[in-house]
Image: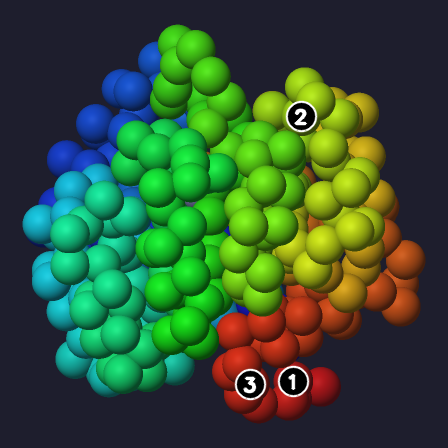
Amino acid sequence: MTIDFHVHFFPDAIAPRAMASMTEKLGGRAFPVGDGTAAGLLAAMDAAGVDIGVLCPVATRPGQFDTLLRVSLAIRDGALGPALARRIVPLAGIHPADPSAEARLRAIADAGLKGVKLHPYYQGFTLDDPSLHRFFCAVRDCGLAVQCHCGADLGFVDEPEARCSPKRIWNLLKAVPGLRFCAAHAGGWSEDKEGFFDRLAFDTDCRADTAVLEQDVPKPAARRAVRAWPAEKLLFGTDFPWAPYAPVMDMVRELRAPGELEGVFGANAAAFLGIDVPEAAD
Ligand SMILES: [Zn+2]
């Protein structure tokens, strides 16, 4: 059972526009490898042998909450077809500055979704901002997990300050003990100017996903991040359609011991989210 803990797609009607605007923001520093649709994702998952994708919707404004929740529930409940219901585990999108965040987190949990996706750059917040402790305590107290973009974002290279560096993740996890948190993009290695990566990896319960951009796959620091993170807390993820499957899968298989791969490629993600997945057929 292979689970990609970090995928994106958009409803067919808005996928072309959403992909075009994100690609423009990237300014040639990265390019999509898919069309941003659900069908495109499923085809790539099939080709790579990936069974389940964890959908990470980002609310760029508080007002997007209802629409994103409706889409996530439609996916889960089969309104968008049996293939998506079987193969996509949708998280919820919520904006931390949403004045109704606490009630909405409760609604997410009551609806049975397992966690929320956050993106400090697209949502304009800094991960360890004390004014957000209340939000993160509410996430924790609702029993929800966090899948958060961490490290640099190539769409925001002009930002003066790192918003989600390993140090900021560390600060957040110290301030909100018990928060179930996954630091996407290999623990935020790309913003680790303060040298907090190892403390985060070894002295906290923080999860990391393996979503490393294709152009970063050969970089020593990226490889070191994927190799060093404790195996039981590492979750295979790609950020598809922003990275193709093969290089990320090959990198994980190369850098981790054979006995670690079952956990990294699926069992760790299932345990982190608390989902049951059927045994692999083979
Ligand atoms: Zn992503």
Q: At 30% across and 25% down in the image, what residue appears?
A: 23
Q: Quadrant of the N terminus?
A: bottom right
Marks 3/2: CA–CA distance: 34 Å
**Residue at x 54%, y 87% (from the top left corner):** 276
Is residue 160 left or right of 109 when viewed as pictured? right
Label 3: element kind? loop
Q: Do the residues labelled 3 and 2 touch (CB within 8 Å)?
A: no
Instruction: Identify which amino acid the numbered label 1 is placed on.
Output: Ala
Classed neighbour count for the residue bearing mark 2: other residues with Cα under 10 Å, few (<14), some (14–19), many (≥20): some
Spatial separation of the CA atoms under disc 1 and disc 2: 37 Å
- Residue type, numbered disc 2: Asp
Q: Is mark 3 within 8 Å of ligand 1?
A: no
The residue indicated by pointer 1 is 280
Mark identifier at residue 277: 3
Residue that mark 2 sits on: 192
Mark 3: few/some/many CA within 10 Å (<14, 14-19, 20+): some
Disc with the residue nearer the chain's start (3 vs 2): 2
Residue 82 image position (x, y, % from top left): 28, 82
Query: Quick check: is the Cβ at mark 2 less than 8 Å away from ligand 1?
Result: no
The color scheme shown is rainbow
- Distance between the alpha carbons at the discs numbered 1 and 3: 9 Å
- At label 3, the amino acid type is Val
Q: Residue at x 26, y 55 (%)?
A: 94
Q: Which of 155 and 43 is in front in this view?
A: 155
Count of all numbered marks drawn on residues in the image: 3
Q: Identify the mark nearer the N-term, 1 or 2.
A: 2
Q: Given contact means CB atoms under 8 Å apart, are the residues at marks 1 and 3 in contact? A: no
